[in-house]
Amino acid sequence: MPNDWRTVIERIEELSQQVEASTVLETVDAFVRSASSAPAPGDVGLGYWRNSLRFTWPTFETEIFSGSIEIYHFTATGTQISTIPFAIDDPLPTALTELLVQTGSPFKFADATGPL
């Protein structure tokens, strides 16, 4: 279980041999660099779908794909799932940072929508 972003990056490197699309790793790299001021996820692993990686926090997960980020927010009444388009080399979209704040995530982005 990762406890800091350096460990998260090492775990991504370990998993990279099992993920076919290199673009997923580039997307994850952008996500990790943008989120590195936030608490590290408790778990990093292969996603539920082919060519994706999963990051888990206590109340939500993100699954990173080539071209999109899915957020699974777990509440007492069920799970809310959001899919946000995301292109490689783009900064994290404002919609993602707003959604993370709305879901009560631990993220505190200083400038997630600016240059990486």
Image (cartoon, rainbow, N blue to C red):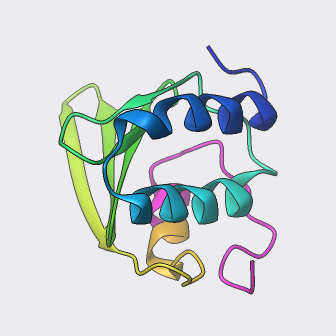
The answer to whether residue 56 is above or below residue 104 is above
- Pick the residue in front: 90 or 108: 90
95 relative position to 63: left or right: right
Q: Quadrant of the C terminus?
A: bottom right
Q: Which residues are magenta?
A: 99-116
- Residue 35 occupies which quadrant of the picture? bottom right
Residue at the image position 56 percent from the left and 74 percent from the top: 92
Tell me residue 91's x, y (percent).
60, 81
* Residue plotted at (56% across, 28% down): 14
The quadrant the N terminus occupies is: top right
Estimate the x, y position of residue 27 in percent, counting from the top left: 49, 64
Q: In the figure, is residue 40 to the left or right of 4?
A: left
Residue at 32% across, 68% down: 68
- Residue 47 within the magenta-colored segment of the rendering: no
> Which residue is most to the top?
1
Tell which of 79 and 54 is nearer to you.
Answer: 54
Residue 48 in percent (x, y) is at 21, 34
Q: Is residue 70 visible?
A: yes
Is residue 98 shown left or right of residue 115?
Answer: left
Inspect the magenta stretch and tell me whether residue 107 lies in it: yes
Question: Could you say which is closer to the camera, residue 110 or residue 49?
Answer: 49
Majority secondary structure of magenta residues: loop
In the image, is residue 107 above or below residue 7? below
Image quarter for residue 7? top right
Is residue 55 visible in the rendered image? The answer is no
